[in-house]
Each structure stands twice: as C-alpha cells, then as structure tokens.
Amino acid sequence: MLTGKESLLEALSEALSMEKGTREFYDYASQKAIYDKTRETFEKLRDWEDSHMHYLLYLYQALSDERDMITYEEYLEKLPAHEIESGISIKTARELFEKRDFIDDTEAIRLALEIEGKAFNLYREFSEDATDSNAQVVFQHMKEQEAQHINELKNLKMMVG
C-alpha cells in the first residue's frame, strides 16, 4: 500500500499494481452488469485503467536505471495485483459486489462510485504528502483521472437510476 513517502519508482510500481487490480475489478463488474449501458461503462472504466497502466509503465521505464524494455504484456504478467486503487483488496471488492443483491445496476454504480471516491482521496493524499516533486505530479495526474471516472459514473447513475 502506498503511503506517499516512496521514491518515484516505488510509487509508480505500486500505483501500477493498484491500477491493475482496479482494471481486474471493472472487468469482473462488467460481466455482472444487468444493463448494457452499465456494462459498457464498466468496460470503458476497465479500458481507462489499462491506459493508466500504459502511462505509468512508460514513466517507470523512462526513469528506471535498468531500462529493461519488456513489453507491456510481459510486465503485467509479472506484476502482482492485490489491491484496487481505493486501498481495499481485490477479493474484498469482489465480495462487496457479490454480497449485494442487485435488482438493477444502481447499487453496482454506487459501489463503483464509492471505490472511485476512495481512489480519488488516496491519490489526493499521496499528491499532498509525496516528498518527491515528480511523484506529486504523477499522483496529481492520477487524481484528475479518478475525477473523470467519478463524473462518468455520476452520468451513468442519472441515466440508469
């Protein structure tokens, strides 16, 4: 779990892991969605998480002394993902999703909003607490991305609910 006190490379590596976990969660959630629009939005969020991972991996490789140019797919295969961006485990996120008896997708959207809100706050805290100015910039950028996710989910909630 990130604390905001890591070096930039450590922060990028941990953020990559959390992005991967969140991508896996949205992939799972999209398969459970009832309405097409909800499934499409969860798939869009999954794809956004994927683009975040590409961005973070690019930064990581550009800054790494090793500069081992492995492919994106190879890196992701090696990268463990135990948590989603909100700081909860992937297993717990899936359990939260399964425990709720969804009559429609409104509850699933609320859960996704809760997760994205926690992710926004997490990246906000990291951007404020980071001792490395470059890490601050990366976390600020990630916070802005989470704000876009929240807006997308709010728009979906208005359409569905």
Image (cartoon, rainbow, N blue to C red):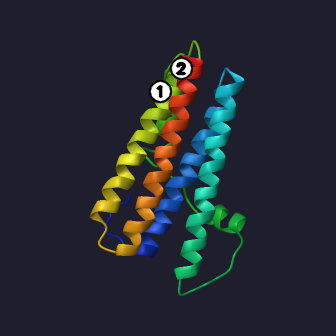
Farthest-out residue, top: 103
* Residue type, mark 2 in image: Thr
- The image's mark for residue 130 is none
x then y, percent, for residue 74 = 70, 68
Describe residue 104's horizontal placement relative to residue 154 as left or right: right
Whether residues under marks 2 and 1 lie with C-beta atoms below 8 angstroms apart, the answer is yes
Q: Residue furthest bottom?
A: 65
How many labels, in total? 2
Could you say which disc has been placed on residue 106 in the image? 2
Q: Residues within 10 Å of mark 2 (few under 14, many from 20)?
A: many
Q: Residue at x 47, y 57 (%)?
A: 142
The image shows residue 36 at horizontal and vertical percentages of: 72, 25
**Residue sitting nearer the eye, 71 or 116:** 116
The quadrant of the picture occupied by the C terminus is: top right
From mark 2 to mark 1, how far is it between C-alphas? 6 Å
- Residue bearing the label numbered 1: 110
Q: Is residue 76 left or right of residue 150?
A: right
The picture quadrant where one finds residue 29 is: top right
In the image, taking residue 80 as reference, residue 139 lies left or right, namely: left
Which amino acid does the dot numbered 1 rest on?
Answer: Arg
Q: Examine the rendered structure and indicate whether residue 70 appears above or below residue 98.
A: below
